[in-house]
Amino acid sequence: MTATLQLTEQLISMASVTPLDGGCQALIADRLRPLGFVCETIESGPADFRVTNLWAKRAVAPVDSAQAAPEKVAKTLVFAGHTDVVPTGPVQQWDSAPFVPTHRDGKLFGRGASDMKTSLAAFVVAIEEFIAAHPAPALNIALLLTSDEEGPALDGTVVVCQQLQARGEVLDYCIVGEPTSVERTGDMIKNGRRGTMSGKLTVKGVQGHIAYPHLAKNPIHLAAPALAELVGIEWDKGNDFFPPTTWQVSNIHGGTGASNVIPGQVVIDFNFRFSTESTPDSLQKRLASVLAKHELDYDLAWTIGGLPFLTTPGPLVDAVRDAIRAETGLETQLSTTGGTSDGRFIAQVCPQVIELGPPNATIHKINEHVKLADIEPLKNIYRRVLENLNQAARA
């Protein structure tokens, strides 16, 4: 059994449903301290939803100079991820216990196998191998882990990033271990993600008896033409890296439950997934203009879940592409599709962020698994990225 597989199985066996960490971060910190990492636990959140975060950093030894030239200041690569997992769902529907790592048909089964305990184990073993080969690297290495990625994400990575920014900590590169691959480890990476912004629209009317519509005002009827117009809007055309912005209604609720009552209001939940071609402000203004055009009486509450981020080809993307090519022979595909990740928080304090992990076909599903053949290549890719960036730092 390889060191990566062994650590992956240890992590899977630690039940860590959001916001629980299950001891995963302590195990990882114990592996990192002998390598020279300074490990800091940052807790956040209320007592009934306490989140555990780990910030661990191994800094390059200071130079023998009062002031190093700016170009000689060591760059920092951060490996980021989450130790929490989603609930198992009905345990009886699993073919094996979700927190007992199990091998079948060349696959490793268990909750978190692909999202994302394999990536965490690959991070750690890649760092161990890299430090063994390069005991005095020219690159700072850090890990940022949270137990609040699968939950509300209010007390996890965002809190750590805020603290790092307040301290003046400079981050240069970040690899988030989200499962990004499709068929085989390394065939796709995310070099950005769309922004997400939700709205709760309450359109007001006048409740009344359905047999006397002239004495009432049906808010569903009033809202329908505006919704039809919003559905047909082209918000932007996207760009070379992002698909066009989309607007989708997720829920509509109106009425008292009785079939003979015109409701007094209708509540409509919707969401934008937006590219870098639009901003929250521009989208909010365009939507408000449609509501005004239809003369609706309404309340509207906005929630910005995350801004879009993009890492264009450059030092980090090049290092990752080269590592994937050298390890697998694949020419990786750059993508910004899919949902949000904690990369949206890290991108606010780090200029280059990409996501790279194992195939994602079974994430959040019953019988979540990862192919055994995908585990070791992932660790080797992470190690090769370290080597590539370290070599660039010495150049």
Image (cartoon, rainbow, N blue to C red):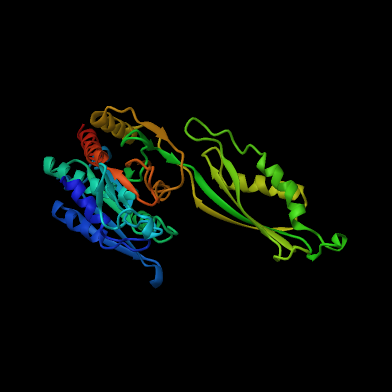
- Can you name the residue that lies furthest to the bottom here? 47
Quadrant of the image occupied by residue 297: bottom right
Quadrant of the image occupied by residue 164: bottom left
Residue, x 20% and y 51% (percent of image)?
7
In-image side of 84 versus 104 (left or right): right
Q: Is 98 placed above or below 63 here?
A: below
In-image side of 373 versus 43 (left or right): left
Percent x, y of residue 101: 25, 53
Percent x, y of residue 173: 32, 42
Residue, x 30% and y 53% (percent of image)?
110
Please indicate, yes or no, whether residue 392 appears anywhere in the rendered image.
yes
Quadrant placement of the C terminus? top left
Residue placed most toward the observer, 184 or 38: 184
Residue placed most toward the observer, 43 or 250: 250
Residue placed most toward the observer, 210 or 235: 210
Percent x, y of residue 60: 19, 46
Please indicate, yes or no, whether residue 60 appears anywhere in the rendered image.
no
Quadrant of the image occupied by residue 91: bottom left
Q: Is 13 placed above or below 312 here?
A: below
Count of numbered circles on the image: 0
Percent x, y of residue 108: 27, 47
Q: Is 244 placed above or below 306 here?
A: above
